[in-house]
Every structure is written in C-alpha cells, then in structure tokens.
Image (cartoon, rainbow, N blue to C red):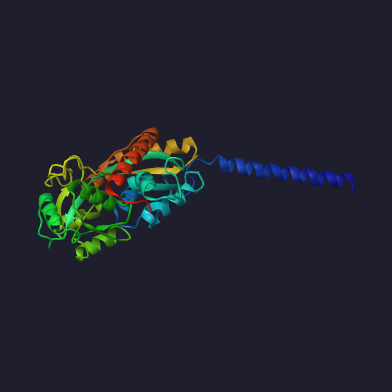
Amino acid sequence: MPIQLNYRIATLTLITMFIQALCTSQSLAQPYPSRAIRIVVPFTPGGTTDIIARVVSSRLNEVLGVQIIIDNRPEAAGNIGAEIVAKAKPDGYTLLMGHVGTLAVNPALYLKMPYDPQRDFSPISLVTLVPSLLVVHPALPVRSVKDLVTLAKSRPNELAYGSTGSGGTPFLAVEYFKVLTKTKILEVPYKGAAPLTTGLLAGENQLTITGIPALITQFRSNRLRGIAVSSAKRSSAIPELPTIAESGVTGYEATSWYGIVAPAHTPNDIINRLHTEIVNGMKHPNASDHLKSQGAEPETNSPTQFLTLIKDETTRWAKVIQATGVKPQ
C-alpha cells in the first residue's frame, strides 16, 4: 500500500478518535441533571411513602427542570424496590424514597437481605417524620386505647389488624403495641396501604396503626374512628387525639421517618446538589404546608446525620423486633 495512502488513513483515524473523545468529554461535562430522574417507591401507590415521594418529586421537578418519574415497585416489605436502587448505576438518575423499614428495620426481619442499607446507599437527606394513627372500624365498640386494650384482652386472638407485611409501618407499630399492652391481636397482611384501608373499611380486619397521610381522609370523613397517634407528642394536624403513650401505654412511640438515598458511590457533587434542592424544597410552603396538613412533619438533615440516624434506628428496631418474638424470615 502506498505510503501516502497509509498516511491519509492514519490521519483520518486520528481525526475520528479526536472527535469521539471530544464528544465524550462534552457528554461528561453536561451539568447534572440533563435527563429524567427516577425515584423508586418500594410500596404501592396511595400509601404514605408514595404520597411523600410525590411531594418531593414536585419540588425537584420545579427546581431541577427535568422530569421526575415515580416508579412504584412494591412487594417484600420494600426490599424489591430498594434492591433495584442499590444495584443501579451511581449517577444520580435513580433514587430511593426510603423509610424506616427499608433502611433500618428489614435487616432484623430477613435472614438474606438483597442489599445492605448502610453499605449500598449514599444518604442524601431525611425528608419528613410521620406519626401513625391508630384507627378502628366504626363498628368496634371502642373509643379509647384503654377500651381497645380491655376488649383485646377479653377476646385474645379474635381481633385482627391490617398490615402491609413484615417491615411495614402497621406491622411494626401494632406488634410493638401488643408487646407493651400484653395483648394478642392477629395480623391480616395486604399488599399495600390502599388495599389495607379498603379491607379495614369492609370489616375484614378491625384496626390498624399506620402513617397519618394514608388514613387522614377516612378519619376526617368519619369512615374510620381515630383513637390515638403513635408519636411522643400530639400531631398538629389532629391535635384532638391523644398519643398512645398518654393514653396509658407508657413508653410507646413509633414515628416513621422517610428520606432520599442514592446508590453507593454516587459522586459527592451530585449528592450535594440533590441535598441542597431537597432541603430547600421541603422548606417551601407548597411542600411543608401540604405535608403538615396530612399529618407529616417536614424534617431534613445532612447526609452524615442521615447515616447516623439509619445506624441508630437499626439498633433500636432490632431490639423491638426481638422483644416481639418475631423470627427472621
């Protein structure tokens, strides 16, 4: 082959490589975010986790200028959805709407976890604290915690509570309640908060304790009777209801928390950008006022503080679960 032809081929090859490298560098240099962000919600639509995720997504959509996609991936007490995010590319485009169950409780409930909450995620920020509401079917002849405990003790294993499965808020809250009150109440599991509520309204079970946002509409319309809230202090959304602790169950507190995490090894500049926008977003009246009206309390923190919370809550709930006698699956 002529030397001149070889030279031309070599030159064209170098030019092609240069153009490809230039395109790649320009692509890498694109500011974050440059496309849609997916927030995985590891529970069904209509539940507390889903409601909070949509508030967060609305604020992020406004400030980041890209579409925020809510991807509901229920089943296995949130483990399926959490695993998807744990194994996703750490580029800031797949996030998890985590909560106390998926990030702190499940390791004590499952022998083989598909992810490690402390190893496989980069915490971004806590978003909100959510007290739970103890409600009963209106046909149940109880109007206070004392009434419920008395009835449950007189009818052991006859009353049933609705849950979303092991690791879900209702399961944890009621099992803890049973330990402290020494009552025997059966569990009726459902595949999410929405079918749980439907079952409760239909009389398939008699009571539940779950996040206020998922029940507040039925409570306000008197379709379900509210008895008490699970937090250490009364809820600002429904201050007329006492706490379970002040109703006689000393030491009871089961407040759920929710926060956003990304896959481990997500670049710090992306974590910092998301943290800033989430913190600012939760301060905006459109978000904070809406959450408060639903019984949630906006609460943010730093990535380091969020990791500390996850570690502390993992230890706390492991002790609670051990006390309930529930065996890991």
Please give left or right for residue 7 compared with residue 68 in the image. Answer: right
Choose between 11 and 33: the one closer to the eye. Answer: 33
Q: Is residue 198 visible?
A: yes
Give x and y (percent) for residue 227. Answer: 14, 51
The quarter in which the C terminus is drawn is: bottom left
Residue in the picture at 57% in, 43% down: 27
191 left or right of 22?
left
Q: How many discs mark residues in the rendered view?
A: 0
Image-quadrant location for residue 308: top left
List x then y, in percent, for residue 78.
38, 53
The residue located at (12%, 57%) in the rendering is 154
The image position of residue 147, as x and y in percent, is 10, 53
> 62 or 112, which is in the foreground?
112
Closest to the observer: 222 or 319?
A: 319
Q: Is residue 36 visible?
A: no
Residue furthest to the right = 2
| Residue at x 11%, y 46% (from the top left corner) | 240
x, y (%) of residue 286?
A: 27, 45
